[in-house]
Amino acid sequence: MEKTIEVETIISPKLLTLKTVQLIKKFAPFGLANSKPVFVLKNAVIKNYKLLGREQEHLKLIVTFVDQNQDYEVLAWGKGMFSSEFKINERFDLAVAIESNTYRDFEKVQLVLRDFKKSN
């Protein structure tokens, strides 16, 4: 039996903003009865990727979109074993949670990968 992921909708990369993160946070607290929403991003172009963690168990992708001039970090916790499936400049559809990350007082959008497939 295949595991399925419930997604809210396909989202435009133009909506990957801190304002969107704030709107999502209004639906908290998240847990078993109220899952964090997952969105699909179509045609994400892989610009770079690297393995993270002591045992290389995590993956960080850098992606962009054709109609955007911005890169996004996609963290894939526990998905390091899939690194060989990603190639630079290939396109993927990504199922992600949209979050924010603050580092040195700078807040930015961070995406957390739930699943992926090669774009058609």
Image (spheres, rainbow, N blue to C red):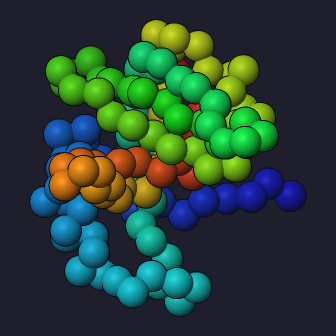
Where residue 20 sits, quadrant-wise, is bottom left
Residue appearing at x 67%, y 42% in the figure: 53
120 up-or-down from 101: above or below: above
What is the residue that sits farthest to the front in this orientation?
Answer: 104
Residue appearing at x 19%, y 70% in the figure: 23
Q: How many marks?
A: 0
Q: Answer left or right for 62 relative to 72.
A: right
Where residue 3 sits, quadrant-wise, is bottom right
Q: Where is residue 69 shown, x and y percent of the image? A: 18, 21
Residue appearing at x 62%, y 50% in the figure: 77
Q: Where is residue 68 shown, x and y percent of the image? A: 19, 24
Residue appearing at x 45%, y 82% in the figure: 30
Q: Nearer the viewer, residue 48 or 8?
A: 48
Q: Where is residue 90 shown, x and y percent of the image? A: 51, 14
26 up-or-down from 81: above or below: below
What is the residue that sits farthest to the right in this orientation?
Answer: 1
Q: Nearer the viewer, residue 54 or 116?
A: 54
Q: Where is residue 46 shown, x and y percent of the image? A: 46, 20
Residue 119 seen = no
1 up-or-down from 15: above or below: below
What is the residue that sits farthest to the top in this orientation?
Answer: 89
Where residue 1 sits, quadrant-wise, is bottom right
Q: Answer left or right for 15 relative to 76.
A: left
